[in-house]
Amino acid sequence: MGSLSLEMDFEPSPMTPRSLAAMTPRSLARRRLFPNVDNKKQKMAQPGAGPRKNLELEVMEPALKNDGPSLDTILVNYLDTLTQRVNYHLGYPVNICYDHYATLAPLLQFHLNNCGDPFLQNTVDFHSKDFEVAVLNWFAKLWEIEKDQYWGYVTNGGTEGNLHGILLGRELLPEGILYASKDSHYSVFKAARMYRMDSETINTSVNGEMDYSDLRAKLLQNKDKPAIINVTIGTTFKGAIDDLDVILEILKECGYSQDRFYIHCDAALCGLMTPFINNMISFKKPIGSVTISGHKFLGCPMPCGVQITRKSYINNLSTNVEYIASVDATISGSRNGLTPIFLWYSLSAKGQVGLQKDVKRCLDNAKYLKDRLQQAGISVMLNELSIIVVLERPRDHEFVRRWQLSCVKDMAHVIVMPGITREMLDNFMSELVQQRKVWYQNGKTDPPCVGEDIGAQNCACSYHKIDYICP
């Protein structure tokens, strides 16, 4: 096989990075990635705005005759479907609004592997550790820890960050019990199973925040063993924020000295938001680690994350690996070398001012959606400092699937990410209001009561919407 040529594979015609960045995903695909496909409108049925259907693909053998569509045609039409579905992606925390994919596309010709410690150079040149360290330094400054005091790495996502943070706690405090609220991300309980840790599930209030009285009771009950606490900065479904300062005060009141507890902060979505609203995440406090997901609020085409901990803790995990001429304290070993470049590019292009604007816009749009739902008589809850709008679950599965909503029990939620516009929210509201007229037109079926799930004051069911009279 011949070598991969930049001119041959990525520059079929003279183009500048600026012109590349200006292209739409569809035109980029057809002009650069699939040059053998006619760039004119394809004579295939357009998928419309409905949910994406399974393509039922098979791997093709190039030596065999194939009467079906070509590889390029399949990919172009797949890309067309994704491009149309972008405007109906409301239920999951992924920022799909970024413009750097075209500029950075030429990097896809290289295999970049950041295997091992990001602060140690490998014996090969195909890595991006210099970009990775720049990203880590940026987050270390954001979370108030000096360069010579921290260690971290770019992970494959928030789950890996949680697995790493909790493993650090377990290694530092082998007899420790893991405490996590029932609204914590499922990966926290996965870590407990993987590491065979004793754990306590803490109750939550109706808004999803940790029940501190329950935490206190269970800490006192297990006072003879150290505590490893997962603090959630933005719960997965309701966007509630556990109060780190209250938790630290409870630990002190229960007699836990700082050498007998470890705190991991899961800030997957909100870790890039709270520093611009309320500086609650800081290594000036006795916390052990913080993790965020890079593909969520910031945005990246590939899942990724950032994990930061104290340098003094990392020796408990570090292993010298002669084969790669490096020390490794990561979970995954081989790590994507592209994601640090995407994160570095996004952070450099936006800066803190740009991120602060994104945070304000998302908070404003979340409140806008909440107000519109309330005006329409629909049950809704929005936590303070949150962009997750929780509403009553739509009755029709097809509607849920069309708008790609996440649902739990009788609740659904919309996560108002940077790429979500008011026009999209207005379209969603218009369809929801019209569909509810169909679902509940005969009066035989009522909207669900979600008073126990989001609070009676937020429920608009037939019982709670009337004035409540105390007995």
Image (cartoon, helix red, strand yellow):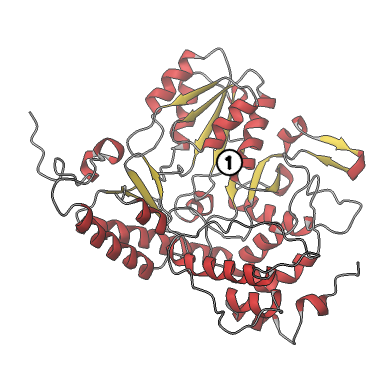
In the rendered image, which quarter contains the C terminus? top left
Say if residue 384 shows up in the picture: no
Relative to residue 161, is residue 217 drawn left or right? left
Q: Residues within 10 Å of mark 1 (few under 14, many from 20)?
A: few
Left or right: where does residue 204 sit relative to residue 40? left
Q: Relative to the observer, which residue lies in front, 427 or 275?
A: 427
Residue occupying the point 84% across, 48% down: 120
Residue 134 falls in image quadrant = bottom right
- Identify the residue under disc 1: 284
Res. 346 visible in picture: yes
On-image quarter of the N terminus: bottom right
State the SS at label 1: loop
Q: Residue at x 65, y 26 (%)?
A: 195
Which amino acid type corresponds to the residue marked 1 in the rendered image?
Lys
Measured along the vertical axis of the image, is residue 314 above or below residue 444?
Answer: above
Q: Is residue 383 above or below residue 132?
A: above
Q: Position of residue 264 (x, y in %)?
A: 58, 35
Instruction: Using the image as rendered, state which of residue 237 and residue 228 is in the foreground.
Output: 237
